[in-house]
Image (cartoon, rainbow, N blue to C red):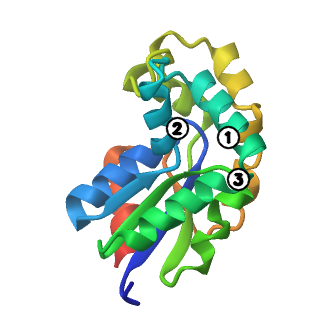
């Protein structure tokens, strides 16, 4: 790995704009992305299980309890190390163990993306990332935000070198990302 490789870890609550930011950085700057949920999705699809948020959370818990708390962090760090892309996005940081190995890599820095809770809920209903998103009630959204996998997000976000406010328009988000890349 060369020292010019930039590794951007993105932390943020559900529907805060992590994927939107990642897609923009991929399109405009040629970044490559690795999501913490990619390996979980691979397993769920292979087992012919629905890729619902609840199944992602259950599988993550089972794997971490039975193989190691930092299993997904190791997978992502290996993927990032093997990549020769000049800009790499690691999307979906949720736990301190998620960045344990990434922080040791040259060129790594963490950004937090934040958005108002009501805005995040409205986005969730329209984005269609998970099959059950469009039918989610406000109460379900709030309850999911209190799950174990979500509890450490604000703690990790507080350690980020940059915080992006994504409560506005796409253009507002893109301007902040462009500024970051410069």
- Label 1–label 2 contact, CB within 8 A: yes
Q: Estimate the spatial distance between the alpha carbons at disc 2 and disc 3, rounded to whole Å.
A: 15 Å
Residue lying at 44% horizontally and 17% vertically, measured from the top left: 131
**Residue 172 visible, this angle:** no
User: Can you give x and y, in whole percent of width and height, for residue 165 in the image?
Assistant: 53, 53
Residue lying at 36% horizontally and 87% vertically, measured from the top left: 4
Mark 3 element type: loop
Which quadrant, please, contains the C terminus? Answer: bottom left
The image quadrant of residue 178 is bottom left
- Label 2–label 3 contact, CB within 8 A: no
Q: Is residue 131 found left or right of 118 in the rendered image?
A: left
Q: Looking at the picture, tell me which residue is in the foreground, 150 or 67.
A: 67
Disc 3 crowd, CA 10 A, few/some/many (<14, 14-19, 20+) = many
Mark 1 element type: helix
Checking the image for residue 17, the label placed there is none
3 or 1: tag closer to the N-terminus: 1
1 or 2: tag closer to the N-terminus: 2
- In this view, 42 is above or below 90: above
User: Can you give x and y, in whole percent of width and height, for residue 30 in the image?
Assistant: 23, 65
Mark 2 element type: helix
Q: Estimate the spatial distance between the alpha carbons at disc 1 and disc 2, rounded to whole Å.
A: 9 Å
Instruction: Read off the residue under disc 3.
Output: 95
2 or 3: tag closer to the N-terminus: 2
Instruction: Read off the residue under disc 2.
Output: 40
Residue lying at 54% horizontally and 74% vertically, measured from the top left: 109
Instruction: Read off the residue under disc 1.
Output: 63
Q: Estimate the spatial distance between the alpha carbons at disc 3 and disc 1, rounded to whole Å.
A: 14 Å
């Amino acid at each position: 790995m060369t020292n010019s490789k930039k590794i951007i870890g993105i932390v943020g609550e559900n529907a805060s704009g992590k994927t939107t930011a990642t897609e923009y950085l991929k399109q405009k700057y040629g970044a490559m992305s690795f999501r913490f949920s990619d390996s979980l999705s691979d397993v769920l699809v292979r087992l012919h299980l629905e890729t619902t948020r609840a199944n992602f959370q259950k599988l993550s818990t089972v794997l971490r309890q039975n193989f190691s708390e930092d299993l997904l962090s190791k997978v992502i760090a290996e993927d990032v190390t093997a990549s020769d892309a000049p800009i790499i996005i690691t999307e979906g940081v949720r736990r301190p163990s998620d960045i344990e190995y990434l922080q040791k890599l040259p060129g790594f820095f963490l950004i937090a993306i934040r958005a108002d809770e009501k805005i995040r809920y409205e986005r969730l209903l329209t984005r269609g990332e998970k099959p059950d998103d469009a039918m989610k009630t406000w109460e379900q959204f709030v309850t999911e935000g209190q799950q174990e996998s979500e509890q450490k997000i604000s703690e990790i976000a507080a350690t980020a070198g940059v915080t992006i406010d994504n409560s506005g328009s796409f253009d507002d988000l893109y301007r902040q990302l462009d500024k970051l890349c410069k």
